[in-house]
Amino acid sequence: MPIHIDLSKSNLENTSDKDKKVEVPAVLASEKDRSVFQKLSAGAKEFYLNLQEKVEKSALNIKTIDKAQLMWNSRLLERHERKSAELSTQISSAEKDAAFLEKAAGNRASFLEEFKKKHPNYSGDLSKLEKEAVEVKQDFQKRIEKINQTKDKLETKLQYRNDKKAVYENKRKTIVEGVSEKIGERLSPHEKRMEKLQGRKEKLETEINDFAALKDNFHQEVEELEADLGQANFRVEKKMLKEAISLIRKELREAEKNIETRRRQKITIETRLAKINKKANKWRDLRNAFIRVSQRQVEFQAVHKKDEIIAGRRKEVEPMPEDRRVIRDEVAKEIFEANEDNEAEEADEDLSQFSEKEEGEQEIKTEKMEAAIPFVITQDIRQQLADLGWGREEQRNIDPLRAQEIIKNQETYKKTEASQPSEAGSAEGSPEIKEQVGAKSSLSSYLEAWNALAGRNYRINPEQFIKSLNIPQDLVQQEIALETLEGFVRGYYSRLKEGGEKNIFEGSGLKRQLKGTARRLGLKE
Amino acid sequence: MASTGALVSELNQGVDEAEAEIGEIEKDLSKVEEETNDKMDEAILEYLADEEEK
C-alpha cells in the first residue's frame, strides 16, 4: 500500500504548539544532525519526521531512493523560493520608491531654476522658497539613502537564500557523483567477470547444439539403415545391418542422455547467473535513479548587488541559462523508472503514485497561476519583456497587468521617434518588419540601445568597448551591418570572459540580449 | 562431451566466484548506501535549518 507524505505548504509551515514538542528521531545518530534538528522550525521538523516515517514504513526497502526523491522534492526547494520571491518583490518596490523620490527631488529643484529663467526681473523674495527647496532636497536624499540601505539589506538576504540553494545543489551533486562513482568502481571488475562467464556459457550452448545436430545425424542414419534392412535379401547382410543399427541406437541414447544432462547444467548456471545479475542490478538501478533524479536543477534569481562577491562565492553553481533549465514535471516522470524485478515494479508503482500526487498539485497550482494577474513584475517577466525589446525605462512605465498583456500578445517594443529605422524604412509603413536584409545601424546607436536594455551590471562603456576592440574612431558613427555589430559585442564579452570576468552574458542570455537590441533598433521583428 | 564437461566445471567455478564477489560488493555498497543516507539526512536538515533568522 503506498504511503503518502503530506507535503502541503500548510503542513510545512505548521507551527502549532503541539508540534513544537518534537523528540529527535533515533535515526539521527550524529550529534551534529541532532543539534541541527533541534534548531529546526516546527514545520521543518514535521517535514523531516514525515520523511523518516515514510522510509520506516516502506515495505519496499528502498529507503535510499525514497530519501533521494525527497531530497529533490520541489516542496523542499519552495521553502526558500517563496522567501526569495518575497524579498525580490520588496527589492523591486524599494527600487521604485527610490526612483520616484529621485524624480520628485529633481522636479522640485528644476522648478525654481525654471522660474528664475522665465522671470529674470521678478522682484519678490525667493530666498524662503530656495531654502525650502534645499531642505526638501536634503530630506529626499536622506529618504533615498534609507531606502537604499533597506534595499542593500534585502539584497543581502536574497543572496543568502540563493547561496543556501547553491550550497544545497552542490551537496546533492556531490552525493550523486559519489554514489555513481562508488557503484561504478565496485561493479566494474564484476561486470568483466560476468561478461567472460557469459562468453563461456555461449560456448556451452554452441557445443550442446553441435551434439544435438550429431544426434539428429545418428537418427537419420538409423532410419536409412532400417530402410536398407527392409530391402536386404541375405541373412549375413541383415545381421550386419541389425548390429550396426543396434550400435548407433546405443550411441543415440548416450548422446540424448548427455545432451539432457548438459542442458540441465546450463539451466542451473543460467539461474545462478540471473540471481547474481539481479543483485548487481539493484545497485545499477540505484545509480541510474540517482543520475536521473540529479537532472532536476535548482533555479534562483541572480542578485545584481556585489557581483564580484557572487562570482567568487559561486564557483560551482551558476544561475542556469533558461535553455538548460529543467521543468520539474517533465523530469519527475523520468525519475525512478523501470526496474526489472517485481520489487522494483512495486516501488515504481508506489513512487509514481507519489509523483502523480505531486504532479496533480503542480497542475492545480499552474492553473491558478495562469488565471491570476501578477501583482508585481518579477525578474522572469522583466526578462521576457526585455526579450521583446522593452528596456528598463519602458518597463518602469508599465504595470503588471500591461506586462502580462505584452507577453501574452508577444508585443514587441516600438520606438516612437520619426528617425526610428523600422518605421521610416518600411515600404508598407508597418512598424514591425522582418529582419531587414543587410540591416545596418551606427555603433553608437547600437550601444545606446544595448545599454537601455541591459541591466546595470551588463551595460557597456562605449569608450572601453572601442578601446578594447581597437575600433577606428571613424567607424563609430558609420552605418555598420547588424551582424558586424553583434560580432563586436560578442567579441567584447569574450575578452571580458578571458580577462576573468565571471558575471557576464553568455550563451542564450547573450543571444537574447542581441536579439532584443536589434528589435529595439527596428532591425528585427 | 568430455571437453564440454570441463567447460561446465569452469563455468560452475566462475559462477561460484561471481556469487562470492557479489556478496562482498553488496556489503561494500550497503555501507555506501548507509553513508549516502546519512549525507542526505545531513543535507536536508541543513537546508531546512534557517540560520538567517536566528
Image (tube, rainbow, N blue to C red):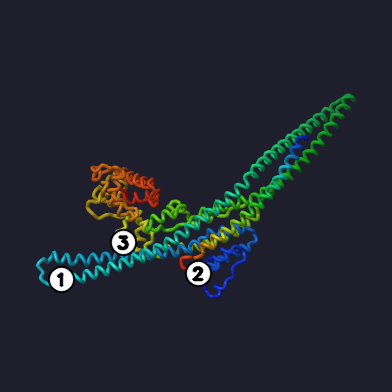
Label 3 sits on what residue type?
Answer: Arg
* Residues flagged by tags 2 and 3 on a common chain: yes
Looking at the image, the residue that sits furthest to the front is A31
Look at the numbered discs 1 and 2 and tell me whether their residues touch, using CB distance below 8 Å: no
Q: Position of residue A151 (x, y in %)?
A: 36, 64
Camera-side mark, 2 or 3: 2
Q: Name the residue under label 3.
A: A396
* Host chain of mark 1: A
Secondary structure, mark 1, is loop
Secondary structure, mark 2, is loop
Q: Mark 2 points at which residue?
A: A13
Q: Mark 1 points at which residue?
A: A126
Are there few (<14), some (14-19), or many (20+) residues within 10 Å of tag 1?
few
The quarter holding residue A246 reads top right
Q: Which of the two labelled residues, at mark 3 and mark 1, occupies the earlier sequence position?
A: 1
Look at the numbered discs 2 and 3 and tell me whether their residues touch, using CB distance below 8 Å: no
